[in-house]
Amino acid sequence: FQVQRPDGTIAYTRAGNFKTNAEGTVVTAGGLPIIPQIQVPEGASALTIGNDGTVSATLPGQNEPTQLGQIETARFINPAGLQSISDNLLIETAASGVAQVGIAGLEGRGTIRQGSLEQSNVNTVEELVDMIETQRAYEIASKMIKATDEMLQYVNQQL
């Protein structure tokens, strides 16, 4: 998602836990407005966000939902090249390439799911097993070095 920083520059975030501020603008948890800005009128109810980022709400005195705007997503040629700055924010660099902004779900962009947050892509059990294997390999290497050191010390004392 694109957000506008206080200095007017654009940053990007994967954190989709949005809320509305006192003026009704959709903002991040840190209070930064998303781009394009979406205003939620006072008294709006039944706020929904479609898989393509379409934001709709039922306005007072209306029975049918009204479209308030559309949340756009950005993708990069090399997402690993983005620079992390703080508060789940990233900025583009020469290594990441220029942001390709558009409608969610099109041209390789992910879809948006209301009420869901992205989970970690780390398998905890697998990482624990890898850590234990690494510890055991370190212990074995350490014991081999110690045994070699003891043998060399014995040879030096005998000669």
Image (tube, rainbow, N blue to C red):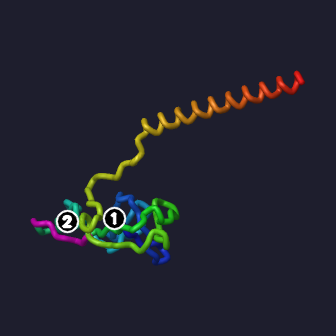
Tell me the kind of residue under disc 1: Thr
Residue at point 23% right, 62% down?
49
Above or below, comparing residue 127 to residue 72 in the picture: above
Tell me the kind of residue under disc 2: Ala
Residue 30, percent from left and from top: 44, 62
Which residue is under mark 1?
20
Badge 1 or badge 2: first in the primary sequence: 1
Q: Can you say which quadrant of the picture contains the N terminus?
A: bottom left
Is disc 2 surrounded by few (<14), some (14 to 19) or many (20+) residues within 10 Å?
many
Give the SS element for disc 1: strand
Residue 118, percent from left and from top: 35, 52
Is disc 1 surrounded by few (<14), some (14 to 19) or many (20+) residues within 10 Å?
some
Above or below, comparing residue 138 to residue 108 in the picture: above
The answer to whether residue 30 is magenta is no
Which residue is under mark 2?
57
Quarter of the figure with residue 33: bottom left
Residue 84, percent from left and from top: 50, 63
> Could you say which is closer to the camera, residue 115 or residue 110?
110
